Image (tube, coloured by chain):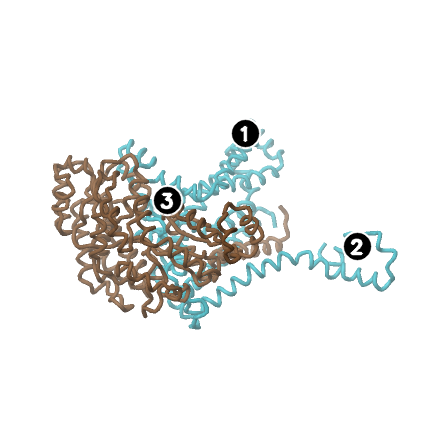
Amino acid sequence: MNSPADFAALSPSPLGPALRPRLPGIAKRALRWVDAAIAPYLYIAPFFLLFIGFGLFPILYTGYVSLTDRDLLRPGAETYIGLANFRELVGDDYFWNSVKNTFLLMVMCSVPQLVLALILAHLLTSIRRLRTLLRMGVLLPNVTSIVAVALVFGQIYSRDFGVVNWVLGVLGVDPIHWQAGDWTSRLAIASMVVWRWTGYNALIYLGAMQAIPKEQFEAAALDRAGTWRQLWHITLPALRPTIAFTALISLIGQMQLFSEPLLFDASPGSVSGGSARQFQTMTLFMYEEGFRLGHLGYGAAVAWIVLLLTFVVAAFAYAMTRRGMRAAGAV
Amino acid sequence: MRVPRWHVAVAGWLLTVAVVFAGASCAKSKPEPAPDKGADKPVQAEKTVAGADPAAGKTAAPPAEKIKLAINDFGVFGYKPLYAEYQQSHPNIEIVESVNEYNSHHTNLINHLAAGSGAADIEAVDEGFMAQLKSRPEQFVNLLDYGAGEREKDYAAFKWQASLSADAKKQIGLGTDVGGLAMCYRVDVFAKAKLPTDPAAVSALWPTWEKYVETGIKFKAAKTGAAFFDSATNLYNGQVFQLDKSYYEPGTNTVIVDKNPAIKAAWDLTMKAIDQGLSAKLVAWQPDWVTAFQKGTFATITCPAWMQGYIKENAPGTAGKWNIAAVPGAAGNWGGSWLTIPAQSKHPKEAYELAAFLTAPAQQVRVFKEVGNFPSAIPAMHDPSVEGFKNPFFNDAQTGKIFGESAVNLKPQYQGEKHGPIRKAIEDGITRVEQGRQKSAESFAQAVKDAFRAAR
């Protein structure tokens, strides 16, 4: 099914059988040619047209804007300044601070999220009662409105009246101002992301786990391997491609971490990620420059660097995927 | 899972590009379709016929075209009863109000202006965003073209000038309210600290901000368990909003945040108060801060007129526990709004007429009595029912008198284009010290650097 001709041979003509006999030979041949050579492209055209309109064009236009000095509220009055925005960006401490925060948060969000998802999925396979309910239940955090999530977590991590500080107080620990610290704030944000996405990944793992032949587990059980040994020696190797896929998605997602740090910030509407920018991510920095300070050109330059860094991360993750799959004998 | 390698590769890259594009497109402003005035005409025509407006039928008024005016604002403007009245006298006008949260409202407005569509016919603008928006007067209808010039005499000078373009040729907004300054305090906590509780006696405690901090030190010594004030940024802002020049050299776009001794003085006094442990170290507008109002964990708060409504709304259980004294230092203004008409409005004339009605002195008096927003129009300020008004929530504090004096004596503060972001940079600096992240000198140096960065 690789060439259009094969495709046409297999698929029925869109004109239907009733029309066929009445058409003269040439028209028939022309239609068949259209069907074979053009129709496949028409079928996939909607995706590409939408992608060009809403994907490629904004990316390229953002690229153009990044080469200009442009004010948010003076559309049309931009001046072309070449790569000056990018030169400024390279020497901008606050930009590199946001890159550092993004990558720190990426690790702090992705690793626990995937490990917990794996454990959760493993537990879910062995559950007999209320199966569907529990499986659907783990997805609930993911469909909850992010604003509601941030609101609840804001109260959980509240300095004076929050649950976490209350528990710590019972244990004799002084209250922590979660938003104020470097690591406390990042930890709180990571917990928000982990809570939201663990169930989603667990469901993907669960799906992949169902595809592992039961005989392997039965054989392992005969050899007296416990459930956690089975997880380590059978499930994990079989799940490698799936783990690589979820890792890729998760890493790319964290590159664009925006809502959680935005809503976690103590002062409403602040986009600086804390009083000392301790949790300002790249996308928050882009938003601050472009939309708060009105430096649209500079913000666009940040957006392009985010794009390039995302390619780098994706390429890295892809390379890891291939290595993992080769090791697992999948390729 | 035997998938051809190239499939995985292509899928991976497409996914990457798609996800990134999703991010990039978020960065672009998303213009919402402008309210389509034409499309719903037939429906409205029906309404006019069916609508209970016998006067329109009799007086053979010009066959008025049904016009829908959209108005976007934030918080509580208290206009609901006024809309009903206006629609009664103008049967061809239909008013649709959309209320949003403070920050989202202004961010939406700026994005809609940048996109060229999506803004309402009337957009409320707060003082915090006015300096930035009036530096782009071409984005708004010049209200002087519609006869706003005759309203100048109504307004306190600083209110009129704050929304006037730099060349004084374009007026983009009609003032609604002003945020004259006062000091709200907890009577019960003051009594516990054996401080006077009568407003006149309390006002006498702090003719200046230095005396205010000294009172705080005495208060602290009484060990009531409450902090003296909520947040150091509010102490700082109270001082700075009284200055006639703050972050910009008046009339220019020159940032003087590093050279203005008054800014440094306000900073230093704020630092002294933090060192003395007078602050509850709350971050203003944050949920903990709101809860603290209810629990009474601080004794005083810098109180612009609109803060009254805020306290009442968030801590209704504290009725009768508050009173209002004079603010230390001179008169000052913090906040207050204008009604503007974006240039993209399709009905600027009708929008102006409505805005003029809503901001007329008589209506400002009504809003003050219903909601508490203090009038910006001088005739409204001097209205006997305003001057004599007492707020029952605050132990019958004479709010009409307190905020009226503050508003009449005011000298306008010049605010440059990036006044808001500069203020945010300094506030972050204060918060860093309050949170123990930095020492005063280090934090001030960074705050000044950040201020210039924000203004660039």
Disc number for residue A187: 3
Q: Is residue B346 left or right of residue B181?
A: right
Same chain, marks 3 and 1? yes
Name the foreground residue: A114 vs B250.
B250
- Say whether disc 3 or disc 1 marks the residue closer to the N-terminus: 1
C-alpha distance separating marks 1 and 2: 51 Å
Rendered image quadrant of residue B153? bottom left
Q: Residue A19: x, y in percent?
A: 84, 55
Which corner quadrant of the image does residue A129 belong to?
A: top right
- Residue A125 appears in the picture as rendered: yes
Mark 1 or mark 2: whose residue is earlier in sequence? 2
Q: Colour of chain A?
A: cyan
Which residue type does callout 1 highlight? Answer: Ile
- Please tell me the numbered disc located at residue B386: none
Check whether the beta carbons of the residues at disc 1 and disc 2 lie within 8 A of each other: no
Judging by the rendered image, the residue that carries numbered circle 1 is A127
| Real-space Cα separation, disc 2 to disc 3, in angstroms | 61 Å
Amino acid type at mark 2: Leu
Chain given the colour brown: B
In the picture shown, does residue A4 fall above or below B188?
Answer: below
Camera-side mark, 1 or 2: 2
- Helix, strand or loop under label 2: loop
Residue A15's mark?
2
Q: Residue furthest top?
A: A129
Residue B243, position in %: x, y? 21, 59
Residue B21 in the image, given as x and y percentages of width and height: 52, 57
- What is the distance, in whole Å, between disc 3 and disc 1 at their CAs? 31 Å
Q: Residues within 10 Å of mark 2 (few under 14, many from 20)?
A: few
Q: Residues within 10 Å of mark 1 (few under 14, many from 20)?
A: few
Q: Is residue B82 left or right of residue A54?
A: left
Please state which of residues B291 and B440 is positioned toward the viewer in this rendering.
B291
